[in-house]
Image: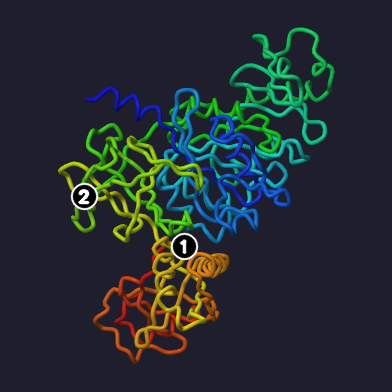
Amino acid sequence: MDMTLIDEVQSRRTFAIISHPDAGKTTLTEQLLLFGGAIRAAGTVKGKKTGKFATSDWMEIEKQRGISVTSSVMQFDYLGKRINILDTPGHQDFSEDTYRTLMAVDSAVMIIDAAKGIEAQTLKLFKVCKMRGIPIFTFVNKLDRQGREPLEIMEELEEVLGIESYAMNWPIGMGKEFLGIYDRHHNRIEQFRVDENQRFLPLNEEGELDGDYDIKKTSLYDQALEDVMLLNEAGNEFTTERLKKGEVTPVFFGSALTNFGVQTFLETYLQFAPSPQPRQTDQGEVEATEEEFSGFIFKIQANMNPAHRDRIAFLRICSGQFERGMPVQLSRTGKTIKLSSSTSFLADDRNTVDNAVSGDIIGIHDTGNYQIGDTLTGGKKNFAFEKLPQFTPELFMRVTAKNVMKQKHFHKGINQLVQEGAIQLYKTYRTDEIILGAVGQLQFEVFEHRMKNEYNTDVMMENIGSKIARWIENEEDVKDAMSSQRSMLVKDRYGKLVFLFENDFAMRWFSDKHPEIKLYSLL
């Protein structure tokens, strides 16, 4: 076995950052990139008037709104490790994109706003991580503002998320009285807003400061010592094994905006986070260190570079080594494809990548060959990784081009944006009118914005409301006459028949009237 390959794979750390909108996800991502030397200055998302925008928010609509609606990929080196960060969409309307992204990582970092605690979107994404069994690290953010009691946040983690928590560090004060953190893991105190030579103060064997320091004279220091003593006596046990099993989450306190506690978090994360893990296929497990190349596509993005009108497929390498120009087999079709155009990422900045190994995320140029979930293999074996989830949409719009002369642009735009997976395409059974389905309203706004800006096509969108979409197991028994206003018969992009029911009552009425038709939903 190639020891160089094993060393390379074991140096990889691939993780996603999950949070509720506004918890500070994009800000934390930027601070991590600063440490890796990938960027020179962080422009906070709130600094819109200055013309500075977050590095990981590259799409125009993201810059206007200050939110992430696509999954960016960023790669940098730090302390001998190569780190791949996947910055997931913070907005709940893009949970499907996030869900697929979480299939491509080996661990996750969950950000919690110290004032708000666990919010709805965080809970939803946490459940996906838990289901996948990936280790979760928690960063409690915004300690420079007044928030909830740290012990209360720890209790909420355990009660709401059902996972034990272990405080790697502990805040000394909060908001205007925030003095720093008591670092249990490194046995030191990290002071907030002091000269660099005063930043780290070592603790003695009893876990207290020796010497004459101003921080010792405060009641906040005494309170932190009491809290830490309680955690030492009655807190949960932390082991790498328990972390890997998803039984415990290490908790870090800090402030991404002021870049405090972030470096300590990153260095501790690198110590405990797993390197690339084995992956399940339809023919058993594939080890990350196997020599034969394999990977899967978890995302497709059109027009990352508007000047070139290109389309990039995001590939998670699961085993072996990628070399530019290598031939691979597309499992779904059996077709051999030469991977000659490949890139690594820093949001919208791209560099040609000649070599990559398991754990890395690379972009490959797509001329229409790939679908989300496709498996690529470089050896003689032809297998497929686990299927990626597709959500059942809940909101639907009838879409037409405003200008009939732009039908070509209209259809090209729709086909490319549908392949990205954020919206789903349907056509009415008889007349082929286009209907788009989405999990959330914002996806339609992004679609309309991108059709205008990237495909130069204005669209008319007619809201047909919330529907219940159900696919059909026995299509041969479906008759055209079964379609009505309350149970519209359409075809999805693969030609499969789907009923769009007006509501639960309409679906039950249909099932009573046509018991022979077997319906099913996606996720």
Which of discs 2 and 1 lies nearer the camera? The answer is 2
Local secondary structure at mark 1: loop
Question: Which residue in the rendered view is the most extreme toward the top?
Answer: 211
Rendering coords of residue 488 (x, y %): 42, 84
Residue 511 seen by the camera:
no
Say which amino acid is labelled 1.
Ala
> Which quadrant would residue 111 be assigned to in this image?
top right
In the rendered image, the vertical position of residue 162 relative to residue 440, given as above or below: above
Residue occupying the point 54% across, 53% down: 89
Q: Which mark is residue 422?
A: 1
For mark 1, does the 10 Å Cα neighbourhood hold few (<14), some (14 to 19), or many (20 or more) residues? many
Rendering coords of residue 136 (x, y %): 51, 38
Read off the residue under disc 2.
329
Rendering coords of residue 40 (x, y %): 61, 34
Local secondary structure at mark 2: strand
Question: Which residue in the rendered view is the most extreme toward the front?
Answer: 307
Say which amino acid is labelled 2.
Gln
Left or right of 282, for residue 123: right
In the rendered image, the vertical position of residue 136 relative to residue 81, given as above or below: below
Q: Nearer the viewer, residue 231 or 39?
A: 39
Left or right of 66, for residue 401: left
Q: Earlier in the sequence, mark 2 or mark 1?
A: 2
Give the spatial CA distance, label 2 vs label 1: 26 Å
